[in-house]
Structure formats: C-alpha cells, structure tokens
C-alpha cells in the first residue's frame, strides 16, 4: 500500500494553497492570514496574535555589539574582535495559557530533628508561555513576552526575509505541557518548605488560551576562531540567552 502525505491544503477562508511541514498542526495562510488546524482543515477558533519586530539587521547588529561591550564576565575585546556570521529573524509560535494552577503536596522537612511531615497547597494565577515546537531548545522562562504590544495576526507586518514557523502541538498537548512545567516550577518553590517530596499533584483551571507568533533573532558570531550564539527578543532587543567566551582573570 502506498501512503500519500499531503504537503499543502487549501485555505478555508480564501481558497489559496497553504503549505506546511511534517509535524506541524496549526498553519496560517500567507495570503489572508487565516489560521487553520491541519488535521481537520477547519478554521482556527483561538485568538491568533502577532508581536511586532522592532529591529532591522543593522540595528540588531548594534544591539549585539552593545551586549558584547557590557558585563564584566566578557572579554574586553569581544565587541572589537568578534564578527557576526549570521543574523536570522524567526517568528516562533507560542501558546499562552491563562489560568489558575493549584499544586497539592506532601513532603518531609528534614532540617530539624526529628523530621516533620508537611502538607499544603500552592495556588497561583499564571499567563504561562509554552513554545509550540517539539524539538526546539528555547529559554522560555527567561522570555518576558510583551503581550501588551500584541496585534491581530497580520502576515503583511512580517518581513519578507523572516522565517515563520507553525505550531507542532495542539490544545490538549499544550495544556499538559503547561501543567507539567508549572508543577516543576512549584516543586522548585517547595524547596523552601520541604526537603523531600512524598506526593505532588497539580490541577490547572483554564481561563483562556492565546496563540501568537513572536519575533526572535538567532545570532551566530565568531570570536578567536570559535562560534557562539545569541538569542534576542526582536520586540525589545533583550538578550534571552547568550554564549560568552571564556576569559582568564
């Protein structure tokens, strides 16, 4: 039996061909901006937003040089002797989960003698950010995404040289990821109260979900024949993650 894998579908809004890659679940028409769930071909019923990029290539290079010139952990000649090899703008897909998470726990406080069993609950309200890609390593927790600056998704606002990635996870997987990540975060917070966890469980009361694309610059630079990488928020110019060459003090 021969299996045929579709590589494009028609936009249910304007009828134009919509291309997508293997593994992607949600895709957006570049002609009209309509968002579609690939498996069903049906219209996307969540809010789809866009964070605008505020940096062109030249301004981003200035941002990189400014980062290189600041901080005592960097080589003093980093800005002068480094060379930017690549500067790629990618619009990454994210889900934002608005909800209340509650984690019930039971553990042992061992810093006193005898040890004490403690039980309780952590409950917090979150706008939890989930990267909508499966194999991409990204510092999500360091990214303070500027939700106040979001606009309705508009493909015409995206630079022609930029790359746009689609979501590889659906609503159910997003919620499961958010719940697991929040539980891990709460486990970290629990280290202040208990030394050993016996039981832990988290529930997530969903209020709203938002799907959006945000501009991220991926920079590769060379310093003394070695390659390093920077990940920079295209809206604010903040460095989310940066490789720093080792220095000798």
Image: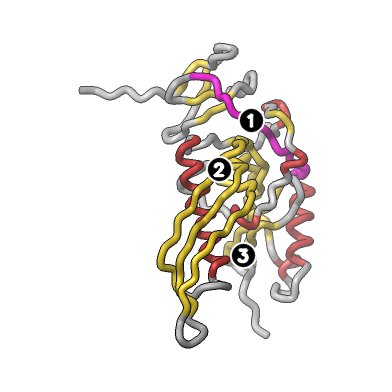
91 is higher (above) or lower (below) than 222: above
Q: CA distance from mark 2 to mark 3?
A: 38 Å
Magenta segment range? 42-56
| SS state under label 3 | loop
Q: Nearer the viewer, mark 2 or mark 1?
A: 2
57 or 187, nearer to the observer: 187
Q: Which quarter shows the N terminus?
A: top left
* Spot occupied by residue 205 in the image (x, y as percentages of width and height): 55, 43
Query: Main SS of the magenta segment?
Result: loop
Q: Residues within 10 Å of mark 1 (few under 14, many from 20)?
A: many
Name the residue located 66 percent from the left edge and 57 percent from the top edge: 240
Q: CA distance from mark 3 to mark 1?
A: 32 Å
Q: Which residue is mark 1?
A: 48
| SS state under label 2 | strand
Q: Nearer the viewer, mark 2 or mark 3?
A: 2
160 or 182, nearer to the observer: 182
**Does the rendering let one see residue 93?**
no
220 or 10, nearer to the observer: 10
Q: Which residue is mark 2?
A: 205
């Amino acid at each position: 039996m021969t299996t045929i894998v579709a590589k494009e579908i028609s936009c249910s809004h304007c009828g134009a061909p919509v291309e997508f890659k293997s593994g992607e679940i949600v895709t957006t028409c570049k002609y009209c901006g309509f968002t579609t769930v690939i498996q069903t071909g049906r219209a996307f019923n969540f809010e789809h937003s866009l964070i605008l990029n505020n940096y062109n290539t030249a301004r981003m290079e200035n941002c990189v040089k400014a980062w290189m010139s600041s901080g005592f952990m960097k080589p003093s000649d980093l800005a002068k002797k480094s060379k930017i090899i690549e500067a790629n703008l990618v619009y990454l897909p994210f889900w934002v989960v608005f909800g209340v998470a509650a984690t019930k726990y039971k553990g042992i406080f061992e810093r006193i003698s005898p040890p004490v069993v403690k039980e309780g609950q952590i409950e917090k309200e979150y706008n939890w950010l989930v990267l909508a890609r499966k194999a991409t390593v990204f510092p999500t927790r360091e990214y303070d995404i500027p939700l106040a600056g979001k606009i309705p998704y508009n493909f015409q606002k995206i630079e022609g040289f930029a790359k746009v990635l689609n979501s590889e996870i659906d609503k159910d997987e997003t919620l499961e990821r958010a719940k697991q990540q929040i539980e891990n975060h709460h486990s970290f917070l629990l280290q202040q109260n208990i030394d050993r966890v016996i039981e832990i469980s988290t529930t997530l009361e969903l209020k709203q979900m938002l799907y959006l694309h945000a501009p991220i610059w991926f920079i590769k630079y060379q310093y003394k024949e070695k390659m390093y990488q920077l990940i920079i928020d295209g809206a604010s110019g903040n460095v989310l993650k940066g490789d720093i060459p080792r220095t000798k003090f």
